[in-house]
Amino acid sequence: MVLNFSNCFVWIYIAGIALTFIANHILEYIDYAARKKNGGVIPDELKDIEAAKTAFDEKKLKKITEYENEKYFFWIPKSVLGAGLNLCLVLFGFYPFVFSKLAESNLITTNSFVHIFLFLVLIGIPSEILGIPFDIYLHFKLEKKYGFSNMTVKTWVLDFIKGLVVSIILSLIIVFAVTFILSKFPSNWWILVSSVMIAFSFIMMIIYPKFIAPLFNKFSPLEEGELKNKIQGLLEKTGFVNDGLFVMDASKRSNHSNAYFSGFGKTKRIVLYDTLIKQLTTDELVAVLGHELGHYKLKHILKRVLFILPIEFLIMFVLYLLSQNVELYNSFGFMMVNETNIVNYQFIGLYLSTLLYEAVSFVTAPISGITSRRDEYQADKYAATICGKSDDLISALIKLNSENLSELLPPKIYSFFKYDHPTLVERVSALKKIQFKDK
């Protein structure tokens, strides 16, 4: 179970973890330094907007800076310990140790499904334990300090238990499907595993909002009135069919706000956080929903799926090729050259290949961010057009930024790597141009 440091695979992993760690800390420090300099300043692009003058007074700007700084100082030890743990688990041979001990144990059978599932459960325990104190501090200290968290100990414990049970059930399904495919199709499993994972994602899009989300939150039908009528009018105007308008009791846990859609095709189920309804006017909320509908109307979701599908198959094919290399196993301490159980052998290869991919995936992150930000601009323009003006969306974005204590002036290099949405200033500037053209 000793790592083979003469092998390139283990060095690729170590280098990937180290470079990702260093890059993230450089970016976060650049953001922190810029915040110290510009944290108390209203950007010039917002100074002529009445909503911004109200939302970003001196007290609020100071609060935003303090909140973002505390999140940064909270992230530092979490990042250090997380990276340290990942390296230690690999360098000290934790994964092959667990795998071999399970293989030797009389508690399990030779069944690959049982062996692999228990392996995944056990290797996930260290990171889960490490994450608990950070999660507790986040909810009960940091978020409460800034008026966001309404979490009680009872709710946190119940959420943890429910989340654990749901994760175990879903993991059982996935592991069973993967082990079955590996056992029946050892030479071309990458095609079927990719297909199953993609199908599972689509199925979860149907199951989650109707069966899993209600385990954690209460969903009530939106009351009759102006808001419901205007949302219904927006749906009809944009060619979508109402599959239900619901309000989620998000304030039970947090005062952060959001809304989301689910459903395929033109049929949409809309969920509004109760906090969002409290923070925005009816017209502002409709403008925000217009933006979300814009993503569907402009086929952003479909285009993204069509773009991702071949990439998913390509990545899985590369992982398959890696899993056929004996040196991959040896480099991480798995002496499995004579492994007779082909399913276990292939699964460990898939797992180790995934570890390698995750270690170096930081370099591909900006690609997703570029396309996502482009789509956001287009959805903003669609919302402004369908609503007949930009003012409501502009004021909604300003309020949401203020209420959620989001940073106003992140450095461009930081937002390039870290943001999947344009910054508030960038979105408002683009919307103001649309408004100007309309006039």
Image (cartoon, rainbow, N blue to C red):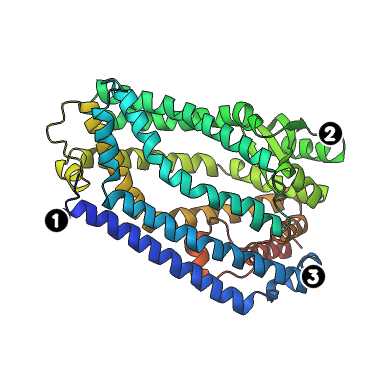
| In the foreground, 165 or 298 | 165
Residue 317 visible in the shown view: no
Q: x, y (%) of residue 33?
A: 54, 76
Looking at the image, which residue sits at the far bottom? Answer: 37
Q: Is residue 326 left or right of residue 267?
A: left
| In the foreground, 48 or 119 | 119
Callout 3 crowding tier (Cα within 10 Å): few <14, some 14–19, many ≥20: some
Q: Secondary structure at mark 2?
A: loop
Q: Quadrant of residue 296?
A: top right
Callout 1 crowding tier (Cα within 10 Å): few <14, some 14–19, many ≥20: few
The residue under label 2 is 223
Answer whether labels 2 and 1 touch (C-beta < 8 Å): no
The residue that appears at 47% across and 45% down in the rendered structure is 129
Observer-side mark, 3 or 1, equals 1
Residue 16, relative to residue 338: is it above or below?
A: below
Residue 23 visible in the shown view: yes
Instruction: Report the amino acid beneath label 3.
Output: Lys
Q: Which label's residue is closer to the chain start, 2 or 1?
A: 1
The residue under label 3 is 53
Q: Secondary structure at mark 1?
A: loop
Q: x, y (%) of residue 9?
A: 21, 51
The residue that appears at 70% across and 48% down in the rendered structure is 254
Q: x, y (%) of residue 259?
A: 68, 43
Instruction: Report the amino acid beneath label 2.
Output: Glu
Callout 2 crowding tier (Cα within 10 Å): few <14, some 14–19, many ≥20: few
Residue 84, relative to residue 186: is it above or below?
A: below
Cα distance between the residues tagged 2 and 3: 32 Å
On residue 6, which mark appears? 1
Cα distance between the residues tagged 3 and 1: 61 Å
Q: From the image, which quarter does the C terminus lie in? A: bottom right
Q: Is residue 24 left or right of residue 423?
A: left
